[in-house]
Amino acid sequence: MVLTSARPVITSRRPDIQGLRAVAVLSVIAFHARLKLPGGFVGVDVFFVISGFVIAGVLARELATSSRVSYRRFYSRRFKRLTPALALTVTVTLLLSVVLESPFGVQQVTAETGLGAMLSVANVVIALVSGRYFAPAAEANPLLNTWSLSVEEQFYLIFPILFVLAWRHHPRAWSAKQMLTWVLTLAGLISFALCIVGWSGALSSSVGNAVLGFYSPVPRAWEFTAGALLFLFTERRRVRTGLAVGCGWAGLVLLIVSFSSISDARTYPGPWTLLPVAATCLLIIGGSATGTVVSRVLSTGPMVYLGDRSYSLYLWHWPMIVFAEALFPGELSARLVAVAVSFIVALAAYRYVEDPIRRHTPTRAGGWARLVTAAFIPPVLVAGVLWQGANHLWWSSWPNNRDQQLALQVARDCVDVPFSPDECTFGAVGNSGIVLVAGDSQAYAAVDGIIAAAEPMGLQVVVTSQSGCPFISGGVDPATSASCLEWQQEVINYVARTRPAAVVIANRSAGYVNREWSWVPLVDGQGKSASSSDDAATVWQASLSNLASTLAESDTPVLVLSPIPDLDDRGDSRSLMDLWMRGGVAATPKASRADYEETRALVVAAERRVAADNPNVLLVDPAPILCGVDACPRVLDNKPVYLDWGHLNRDGSLALAPLWQRALKQSSLLGQR
């Protein structure tokens, strides 16, 4: 084959890039529909690179033709292109949320995210209120996908100014393009370095996570600059057909590897992000020369058609999937129907809203004022109504709501307060001593059942509970958890002074051991963070064993509560539809028994080794009561037993009373006092 040279396509429209947009949006939709595409979410990274390439082209062409950039024209085009379609999606989503989502926290998050999306700060709002992208709380947010739109809009706000400044202000020895290349390269390298710092966890703190976390534009900026630099390097250059063919195939292979090998189990973004970014750059180079196989496939009519509508498809697919999941939890068929509906809605939105407004240019200030008002007022107004209505539970009476359940728990005021035995002692006065219950937030949730078991034996119950602080011996980072360590030692000193009849330890132990949950990290005796679940299990075993040995010096039996199941749901999911159709009693989500056993296997094995090595330790397993053969339900005997996704309410705690009674008797506690 004779290799020829082809002049690159330098017009503003590249059909192959539109086809690449289609690939990106379809991969994201497949991932969100929970089809077998573990790395589908990297389609967002493909969009970021394309945006950098396209925006650099827009600015460079304007500078080449007029020697200036009209910021007014640039931002007005961005507004018309993005905001009206976003406003329609946000408004409809908020209206559907009124009926389909729960006012017990979920609607408030949706309202706040909708307002953030309209102000181009959805990524900041989501990071604050929804947490980790792959967490259940975030996945319940029907506007979660707007985080990436806000990142793009923040890029559009800064990048044109940086571009023009670098273009205009450069040393005489350099051309404008050279100056721009150096500035973009430096910015990209700094962003990538910060991306690696965030990925490594070297700055793991509230501030570090906010600046370098998943939703931040800082560790993503290099993806945009990669696209912009690619435009500068390929502009008006001839790309040999052979090189284009090789780049196209290499990009395709890398993209397939990205979709199949990257998953939500990895900390992201990070070094793995190089794969989809490199793949996108190679595919764009491959499309610079017409006639290559990859370019022809990406430029086919159906691919270009979907690529042109990729923005609307991206906007609409996620709200529809979230609402389908709320109505039919765990049903693949419901998610697939939601995807089909989202395609219909997105195509209609493109036809009647996105495309007409993009093509229309108001000629007078009054026309712009009407367009801006029409875009901002409806979603902002509906967001305010949703937020207020949710905060007042839509002025309706909900059976068994969380506040009512929490009010029934006797130790509700003993969590996240200084250890005060005088204020947090429960049960009738007896002559058999006390049982001390200590742990993270699981401790206060477990107390009611322990009181019910201990009171007939003449035992009082003292409780102390600190959220996110396990009652073990050390195990937490002194640099960030000094107060936790001080509390641990205070409780240990109390045991040495008072010699209680028993100490009950109740922690969310599986959360500390399973590192992929991104729960509170553990550190070993040398202060080294446990980077894997196996390492965390080792630290947990050593810390719990040290605590058991210390308490044994006071002849104190230790009862350790094994992990209770975390429900695979998003808290109290009841909606107005549930209230109207089922009287406020929602469907009962469950935790898979198999998943539960798998997620707690490491920590249970570690705790069993502690019990084997320490005769004063007895494990209390809640599974026989809270779980059946296949599932661990939210409701037992027609009563909800959970306060939220992972804490028992009073009824759930009381359901475990027989377990505690047997454990207390098995330890022969009364005979020891």
Image: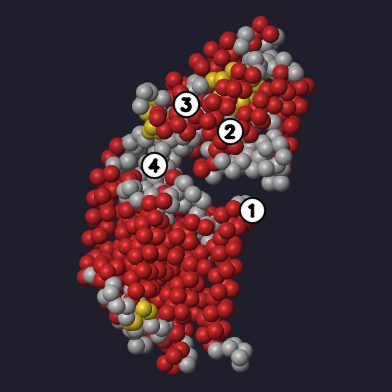
Rounded to the nearest whole Å, what is the CA distance between mark 1 and mark 3?
40 Å
Badge 3 marks a residue whose secondary structure is: helix
Q: Residue type at mark 2?
A: Ala
In the rendered image, residue 131, in percent from the top left (x then y), is placed at 51, 50
Q: Residues within 10 Å of mark 2 (few under 14, many from 20)?
A: many
Sequence order check: which comes first, mark 1 or mark 2? 1
Q: Residue type at mark 4?
A: Ser
Can you say whether 337 is above or below 588 in the image? below
In the rendered image, residue 373, in percent from the top left (x then y), is placed at 39, 74
Rounded to the nearest whole Å, what is the CA distance between mark 4 and mark 2?
33 Å
Q: How many marks?
A: 4
The residue at which mark 2 appears reads as 537
Q: Residues within 10 Å of mark 1 (few under 14, many from 20)?
A: few
Q: Nearer the viewer, residue 234 or 528?
A: 234
Badge 4 marks a residue whose secondary structure is: loop
The residue at which mark 4 appears reads as 573
